[in-house]
Each structure stands twice: as C-alpha cells, then as structure tokens.
Amino acid sequence: MSDRDAMFAAAEQLGSALARQPLGLIIDGKSVPALSGKSFATVNPATGLELAQVAEGGVADVDAAVQAARKALGNPAWRDMSAVDRSKLLNRLADLIERDADELALLECMDNGKPATLTKAVEIEGSIKTFRYFAGWPTKFGGETLPVSPRSGAKILNYTVREPVGVCALIVPWNYPMSMAAWKVAPALAAGCTVILKPAEQTPLTALRLAELALEAGVPPGVFNVITGFGEAGAALVDHPGVDKVAFTGSTEVGKAIVRGSTGNLKKVSLELGGKSPQIVLPDADLDAAAASIAAGIFFNQGQTCTAGSRLYAHASIHDDLIARIADHAARLTIGNGLDPTVNFGPLVSQEQWDRVSSYVEIGKAEGAEVLIGGGRPKALGEGFFFEPTIMANAGRDMRIVREEIFGPVLSALSWNDPEDLVAQANDSDFGLSAGIWTNDLRQAHRLAGAVKAGTVWINCFNLVDNATPFGGFKQSGWGREHGRQAMELYSEIKSIWVNLS
Ligand code: NAP
Ligand code: MG
C-alpha cells in the first residue's frame, strides 16, 4: 500500500470510530455528556462532511468543571507533588504524545484540514517539545531572598515564593489547536495550576485526546478538564467567580470581550491576539531567500497564522522581481486533501472562513488593488473549503486589506522608497505581533528591529518560534508573553514573606 493509500485507510478507520458516538466533555477525570444532552458536529474541511458529534458544554457544565478544578487544586496528590514528580509527569505526557503522534496528526488533519505530514512535523513535534521544555521548570522556578532595610533596624528575613495562580481557563482558537493548547497547559501544570481547556468549536478533537493522555500520564482527576462547545461556554468560564485566570488566544474582538467579562473577580488575563505583520525588504536583500520565506510566511497553514507576514513592503527597485518570485513559490504548492502526504496546502477551516477571505479579496479589488495570483477556489477540488494562495498587488496603506487581519492565504504587496516613511508605514497598524526584515546591511537590520513595534522581529528569517524565547504582542496583539520564564510567571503568583528574627 502506498503512503497515500495507507493515510486514507487510517483516516477511514479513525472516521468510523469517531462517528460511533458523541464525544464527551472531560470533567473530573471522566468523559461525560453535556448536562443538556446536546451535542454539535465538527466537520472535515477537506470534504465539508461531518466528522464527529461533540458534547456542547453550557453554563452548568462549566460550573461542574470549575468545581472539579477547584477541588483538584487542594488535592494533596497534586498540590503537594514534588517538583521532580511534576517534571516526570510532564515528560510522561510528552512521551505519550510522541507515542500517538501519527494518530494526533491524522485527527488534526481531519478536523482542521491542515496537511497531516506538516502537522506531525510542526505541531505535534512542537507540542512534544513544549511539554518537555516546561517539564524542566518545576525544579528551577522558585523565589529569592531579598536584602530589605527595615527602618526599625530589626533583623528581618525576607523571601519570596511562587504559588500557582489557581484555576485557569485556557481558551484557544482553531488555527493551531494542539500547539495553542500545549503552550498554555504545559506552563499551567508546571506551575501547579488546574485547568479547564476550551477548544474552538471547529477543532475540538485533539484537545480531548490531550486531556485523555494527561490522565494516562497520571495527572489527578480534575486537574485537566475540557469543555467543548461554543463561545457561550468560553464566556461562562470568563464570568465564573471560581476561575482565577484566563489565558486566551484568538481574535482581538473576543480578547476585548474577555477583558470586559473578567472584571467580576478581576481575573488575571493574558491574551495572544491577532496580527498584521509586515515583511520589510531592503534593496540589498537576498531575494531568493526572502521570496521563499515570505511565501511560507503567508501561505503556511493556508495563511491562518497569527504571525502571518501579510503586509509586504518591498523596495521599489526590487518589488516586481520579488513578487514574481513569491508567486513562483505559490505556484509550486500542492493543494488538496491533507491526508495526501504530497499535499502542503490544505483547505481553510470552514465555509465561514472561506467567505471571510473571499470577501477581503473583493474588498481589495474594490479598493483598487490587483489580484496578481489566486483570489478564489482552485479548480477540481470538490466540496472542501479550498482557497488559492493569493497576492494582491498595488495595495495602498489605507486599504482594509492592509489594515485588517484577513487570516487567510492573502498577501497584500506594497512598494516603498523613503526609508523614514517605511518605518511609519510598518508601524501604522493596530497590531504589533511580529515583523520580518530582509537585508544584509547589519546596521539597517538592527535600526529597523529597534524601530518596529512588534513582540517578535525576525531578521532574514520568519516564523521561528521556540519555547525558550518569549512570544506575544505589542499594541492590540495582546497582553503578556508565552514561553520561557515569562509563561511560568503568567501561571503563578509571587508572595513576599517577612520573618522577624530579632
Ligand atoms: P475567536 O473567534 O476569537 O475564538 C477563539 C476562542 O474563543 C474559541 O475557542 C472561541 O469559541 C472562544 N470564544 C468565542 N467567543 C467568546 C467569548 N465571548 N468569550 C470567551 N471565549 C469566546 O478566534 P478564532 O476565530 O478561533 O481564531 C482566529 C483568530 O485568532 C485570528 O484573529 C488570529 O489572529 C487569532 N490568533 C492569534 C494567535 C496569537 O498567538 N496571537 C494565535 C492564533 C490565532 P468558539 O470557537 O466556540 O466560538
Ligand atoms: Mg472540524
């Protein structure tokens, strides 16, 4: 059997297992139906057909999950677990993800549409690394002793300790379901919190598998709960007085609703929101390298990436040459059902997303931009939500396709001449998630890296992410940073303790 046939056969087998019964919520270590008895369909974007029925969690289910998570927070088996044992547990979970990597990649491919081979190499491997990275923190994350100077001259010992922030609601989007869950679950568990994970309605399946694997790894019941469902379930978590922290990745609009909704008990809130990242190309850049990376930066994951480099600022002298090269890369993508190992460009996640991307192409045309390549449904691909890699040339700084996040495979190309105005244009955005800079001139590269308002700047590379370095946004791209020590800080409170020794 060819690799392709084997993938389709495995998918058929997994599909019929999924179709057998509605998948439950995970509350207090058990898979349970929603209290309302309701379920909803998750769809395979490559076929447009129902993949599975999933429990539709509501307010009462959220309450049950919060009770379970609060109880688990005080369970000595979790609360008093030694740092070494916590570390072992996270490594065991990483081992189990590794064991089931093929199945997880297949599941994500069928639920989200993303190509299975790339999903395994990027997202599943990345999630394994994330759990291993944060497995290293429990044994290293502690407080300090501090040289305080009390007025009385008393002899005082002051020290700080780190405590888990408590029950965390982790609300994630559909574009990188497994990675976004791992980026939150791993540091939260490493810090000793308990969690309720709310996956996006379009992609609930890997979140449920991740929680099952965590239970298999030995996470006590109630430490890792999953509520599948709609935005109302997310809003109920944000509103619940028993939740201490919300960590959210998703749209800026929902991020703002979360900030407003969390004021009841002033939950700690961290946000990873949208982006409209500039790719800045200077005349001396290595155009081969830039074109390949700019194409990948906007077309990988069908452009459904928060850091997608969606605004191209190419110097006028190389603009036409560069976009022709980017178009060449786009033409070489293999579009199709992501179960096929040769496919590296799948469908968009949903019809709704397809309509959104398509409407932006129309908006761009009406604004005066020109569709250089793509702009619609590729021929002969059946019922899936496929959208061509698209380049909109002659884009202008005030166009909506330059200002708003499209969240699809659409590059808006602009040219520039005046270096001072370039920085102003790159920063003329509500967003500030990331930026790419392409030049061999060291001084220009560093000057621009300093001038661009973005949480991550890539020089002669793009979309590199690592658990060791902070990730997050300036401006309306978010609050806080994931990865690194910063992520451990997001999931802990610091306590200062004074001891009178006189
Ligand atoms: P979204 O609509 O904001 O949804 C994200 C999550 O929030 C989903 O689980 C959603 O549930 C839930 N939700 C919806 N309304 C809610 C409410 N009122 N209160 C609490 N939770 C609520 O985003 P999306 O469409 O899934 O993802 C696309 C967006 O995410 C893009 O704008 C993208 O840039 C952004 N994103 C940012 C990053 C980053 O790291 N900065 C990463 C990935 C994506 P339902 O699915 O059930 O509606
Ligand atoms: Mg789906």
Image: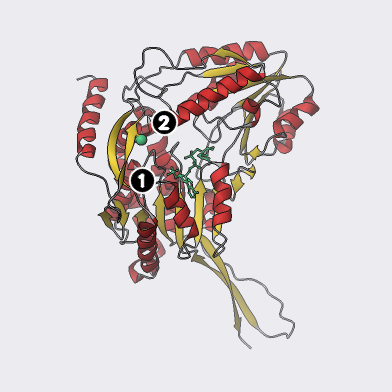
- Mark 1 nearby-residue class (10 Å; few <14, some 14–19, many ≥20): many
Quarter containing the N terminus? top left
Left or right? Give the position of 80 relative to 148: left
Circles 1, 2 touching at the beta carbon (< 8 Å): no
Residue beneath the point at 57% across and 43% down: 253
Mark found first going from the N terminus, 1 or 2: 1
Left or right? Give the position of 67 relative to 283: left
Residue 398 occupies quadrant: top right
Q: Is mark 2 within 8 Å of ligand 2?
A: yes
Please, what secondary structure does the residue beneath circle 1 have? Answer: helix
In the picture of the structure, the residue carrying the numbered disc 2 is 350
**Residue 24 drawn at (x, y percent):** 28, 50
**Residue 219 drawn at (x, y percent):** 32, 58
In the picture of the structure, the residue carrying the numbered disc 1 is 207
* 349 or 293, nearer to the observer: 349
> Three-letter amino acid code at disc 2?
Ser
**Residue 278 drawn at (x, y percent):** 64, 29
Is residue 386 placed above or below 274 in the rendered structure? above
